[in-house]
Amino acid sequence: MSAVSVLGVRHHGPGSARALRRELERLRPDAVLVEGPPEADALVALAPDLEPPVALLAHVPGAPARAAFWPFAQFSPEWQAILYGVAAGVPVRFCDLPAAHSLADDEEHDETGDGLRADPIGALAAAAGHDDPERWWEDVVEHRGDTPFEVIAEAMAAVREGHVPAGREARREAYMRKALRAAIKEGFGTIAVVCGAWHVPALTGPLPPAAADNALLRGMPKVKAELTWVPWTYGRLASWSGYGAGITSPGWYHHLFTVPDRPVERWLTEAAAVLREEGLPVSSAHVIESVRLAGALAGLRGRPLAGLGEVTEAARAVLCEGDDLAVELIQRRMVVGDRLGHVTDGTPMVPLQRDLREQRRRLKLRPEALDRELDLDLRKPLDLERSHLLHRLRLLEVGWGTPGQARGKGTFRESWTLQWRPEHDLALIEHAALGTTVAAAAARRARDLAGAASAALADLTALVEQCLLADLPQALPGVLAALSAKAALDTDVTQLMAALPAMVRAHRYGDVRGTSAEGLAVIVRSMLDRICVGLPVAVTALDDDAAAELLKHVDAVHAAVALLTEPPTDPPPPVAADAAGADGGGGAGETAEEGGAGGSPRARWLSTLRGIADRQDLHGLIEGRLTRVLLDCGELADADDRMSRAMSRGQTPVRAAAWVEGFLSGGGLLLVHDPRLLGLVDAWLTALPADQFTDVLPLLRRTFGGFAVPERRAVGERVSAAGRAGGAGGAGGGNEPHIDERRAAGAVATVLAIIGRDRG
C-alpha cells in the first residue's frame, strides 16, 4: 500500500519552499508529483543546470496566440521539489492537465490554477481578522521556521466546504487524481504530491471513483503542443506584470529564501549599497538606525519579524530621508529585482534561437531584464554587426532593442535601449519556419511582407528602409519590385509624400553603411516626379486642418530632397532684383523650370514650389510657408513684397495671420536680421483694430510661442529699439545697437587670429 503525502504550498512562497525541502528530505519519497504540464517530464533532468527564474513554455506551432508559461523562481516550492527529486534520483512527474488540452481549451484560464477562484488565502486571513492576505501569510507561514502542511490542509478543507469544482478546475483536479492513481498503481511506496494549497482537499481522503474522473476528461479538445525551458525575469514574475499567481515582491522573497540569517539587517545593508552606487550619502549609522526602526515598527504591529512594509518604511525614513525617488530605486532594483534567468545549450531550441544565442556571444550582447542604453558607431565593424542584428530582430517582431535618438551628429551613430523579455523566445519559435538563421528568417519575413496584398505604399517604403538597416541584400530586389509596382498605381499625392522621406533615408543609409541599394534612386526620382505633378492640385481648396496636415508632408519632402545626392550641374543664373513682376512669374521661376524636369531633384522640387507659391488661391498657411522655403533656398528676391501683399488691407486678418504663421514656422531669426520684414509684421499688428487683434491672437501666440527663447528675446529687443526710435519702420535701419569697441576688442583679436589676419 502506497503512502501518499499531499503537500499544499503557496506558489512562489519562500517559506513554503524551505519547509517543503525539509519535508521531502524527511519523507524520502519514491516519487514526486508536481503541479504542471506532464509533457514537460522529459525536461525535468535539465533543471539542475538552469539558472532561475525560468519558465516552461508551451506553444502550439503556427498559432502564436496559443501559448502559456509556467514560471519558476529559486524560491518556488515546485522548483525545490524538482531539484530534490533529480538530486535524489527519484522520478519527478508533472501531474496537472496536459498543455495539449489546456491550450486547446477556449475558456479563459490561468495556468497556475488560482486565477478563476476566490482567493483562499484572503478567506483565511479574513477569518483570522486580517485585512491584508499577503501580510497574514507572511506572518503565519513565510516567517515561520516550518510550514504546518497538515494545518494548511485542514484550513483549505474548511475554506472549500460546500464548494463544488466545475469547468476547467474540475478537469484539472480530475487529471491530478488520475496521475496519482497511476503512480500508486506503479507500486511506489511513498509518494509526495506538491500542489497549490487550494487543491489539497481534492487529492486527500477517499478519492472519487476513477470512472467519474475519466468521464470528466473524456472528449476534451486537444492540440499538438511543444514545450521547452526559457529564461524568465523577476519583473515578469511580479503580479503587476500579468501573471496570475505572481507576487508583488519577487526580489524580497528571493532574499528571504537565500538569506535566512538576519534577513532584515542584510536587506537594509544591501539597500544602502544600492543608494551609494547612485551617489547618495548613506552611512553605517543610517543602516543601524533603519534596522532599529524596522524592528520597532514590527513590535508595535505585533508581527513576529519585520516584513517588507516595515523595512520599506524604515528605508524611506532613514536611508532615503523621505525621498520618494530613492525609495522607487530600491523598489525597482531590490523589491522586484532585475534578475534574468538562463538556460543551457542542452535545452531544446529551434535553430533560430541557437543562431541568436551564438550571435549574442560573438557580438558581446548580453540579455538583461532592465533597460540598458547602447550607443553604436557604425564605422566600427563590431557595432555595425550589432546594428544589423537588432534591426533583423525587429523584422522578426523580436523587440529586444528599441532605437532612440542618437547622441552626437552624423548618420554613422545609433542609440538603442535593450531589454530582454520572455516573449521574445516565443516570437523566435513562431518565426522558426522562416529560416535557420536570423538573417535568413528576416529576409524571408521581408519578402513575405512585401508580397502581402494589403501592404500600403508607406509600409513598403518603411520595409525598404528596414532591409537596408538590417543589411538584407537578398530581400531588397523583391521589396523594391513591390514598391515600384505599388507606387506606379498610387495616385494619392499625400501617400506618396508620406512615403518619400523613408525612401530617401533608405537611400542615404545605403550609402553610409556601404549597402547596395541599386534601383532605389530610380524609384525615389519617380516618386518625386509624381509628387511634383500632383501637388499643385492637392493644395487647392483646403481648410485649416487639411492645410496644416499637408504642410507637414511638404516640410518632410523638402527635408528629404535636401538629402538626395545631386549630379553636378551648372549653377542657375542669379535672380534679378526685379525678376518678380505683378504676377510673380518670370526670372527665377523660368530658370528653375529649365533646370528642373531634366535637372537635379532639388531644382525640380523648387520649381514646383515656385509655381504653386505664385498662385492666388492658396490657403494663407501654405502660401506663407512656401514663401519662406523659397526664400531660404535663395529662390526669391521679393519676399518682402509678398509679405506686404499678404498683410495688406485687402486680406482678412485671419488669412494674414495664417500667412505669418506659415512664413515664420521656419524660425524667428529672419525677423531679427531683416528689419524690413520685421517692420511689416509690426506695422500690420499695430494697425489691427482691437476686435480683429483678438481674433488673430491665438494664431500669433502659436506662431511666436514656437520660437526659441533667445529668438523671442531678440525680436522683442528689435521692436523695442524701433519703438524708441519713433516707429516700426526704423527697426534696425539707422538704429543699430551701440557697440562697445573696448569690450569687443578681445573677440575681434581672436577672430582675426583664427582667420590668419593681423589687425590693421
Image: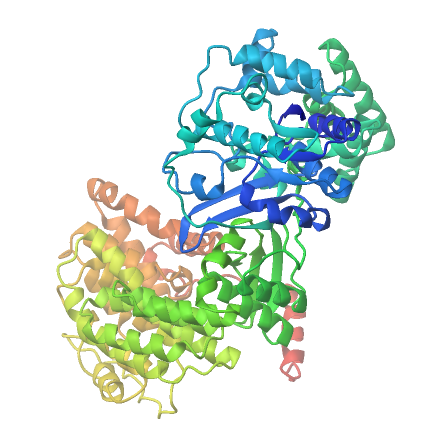
Q: Nearer the viewer, residue 30 or 385?
A: 30
Locate the C terminus and report the quarter of the image it occupies. bottom right
Count the labels in the image.
0
Side of 387 where 625 appears, left or right: left
Does 181 sit above or below residue 89? Answer: above
Instruction: Return the x and y of residue 316 as percentages of the image width and height.
Output: 70, 26
Determine the image quadrant of residue 250: top right
Instruction: Return the x and y of residue 665 as percentages of the image width and height.
Output: 35, 59
Does 261 sit above or below residue 67? Answer: above
Name the residue rendered at 24%, 72% in the picture: 486
Side of 60 where 659 appears, left or right: left
Side of 701 where 708 appears, left or right: right
Q: Nearer the viewer, residue 745 or 547?
A: 547
Instruction: Return the x and y of residue 477 as percentages of the image width and height.
Output: 37, 80
Name the residue rendered at 43%, 79% in the picture: 474
Instruction: Return the x and y of residue 220 as percentages of the image width and height.
Output: 38, 37
Locate the N terminus and report the quarter of the image it occupies. top right
| Colour logic | rainbow
Determine the image quadrant of residue 76: top right
Determine the image quadrant of residue 30: top right
Is residue 758 visible in this depiction of the protein?
A: yes
Q: Nearer the viewer, residue 544 or 667?
A: 544
Name the residue rendered at 28%, 48% in the picture: 699
Is residue 76 visible in this depiction of the protein?
A: no
Side of 107 where 156 appears, left or right: right
